[in-house]
Amino acid sequence: MSPRRPPEVPGPVLLDEAEIARRVGELGEDINEYYHGERIDEITVVSVLKGGFIFLADLIRHLRVDLRLDFMAISSYHDADDRTRGVRIVKDLSESIYRRHVLLVEDIIDTGLTLSFILRNLRDREPADIRLCTLLDRAARRIAPLELHHRGFEVGDEYLVGYGLDYRQFWRNLPSIHVLEDERAVEAIS
Ligand code: PRP
């Protein structure tokens, strides 16, 4: 076995598969209710790679509205105190969102700086509207205020992995969300 291979389970479970599945189903119903209520029958679902892809895949299977799916990828860096974040688009949407109803899906919102950048960028393309859906909200760390329309769970300051979330690209494939608290787990791949 490679000495750099991380442990299979990085720490205790914060949200297990059943809890996540139940909440994702509820979010799907809330989203359906909103769009049906507004008589909107076609939307564009936008996800920011990579972390949100598992949540996105589960969420859209609950949606009962015609949808197009599109992806953006960004590269970002932030300074030591997280006060500034440089964001650059490395993969843009493949279709226009002009006059379309956009549902932006994220796995986690932390400082809000990434999403603020993306929102500014997407608004310039004149969509009909943009709604935000995140599975996890680390609201206590918010720097850039955001209006979240659909939110799965509020979480604390713990470093989380699994269900799409990574630590140095590891553990995205875990079905549950775990707290990465075992320092040996981190040291093993540092
Ligand atoms: C995560 C998440 C958001 C961003 C939120 O992505 O998917 O895009 O961080 O952080 P912020 O609110 O502080 O800006 P990450 O940079 O971990 O990349 P990944 O999706 O490829 O894992």
Image (tube, rainbow, N blue to C red):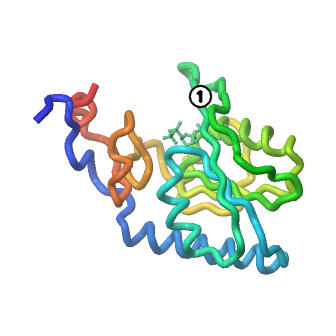
Q: Quadrant of the C terminus?
A: top left
The percent coordinates of residue 169 (x first, y second) are: 38, 38
| Viewer-closest of 144 and 17 | 17
Q: Quadrant of residue 115?
A: top right
* Residue drawn where x is 58% and y is 30% of the image: 75
Most foreground residue, 59 or 111: 59
Kind of residue sitting beneath label 1: Ser
How many numbered markers are drawn?
A: 1
Quarter of the image that includes the N terminus:
top left
Q: Secondary structure at mark 1?
A: strand
- Does 125 sit above or below residue 53? above
Q: Is residue 43 above or below residue 105?
A: below
Q: Is residue 123 left or right of residue 56?
A: right
Q: Residues within 10 Å of mark 1 (few under 14, many from 20)?
A: few
Measuring from the top left, give residue 116's x and y in whole percent.
73, 39
Asked whether 173 or 78 is in front, the reply is: 173
Residue wearing tag 1: 76
Left or right, 120 with reference to 4 = right
Residue drawn at 33 percent across, 54 percent down: 174
Left or right side of 126 for 94: left
* Ligand 1 under 8 Å from disc 1 Cβ: yes
What residue is rendered at 75% in x and 74% in y?
Answer: 34
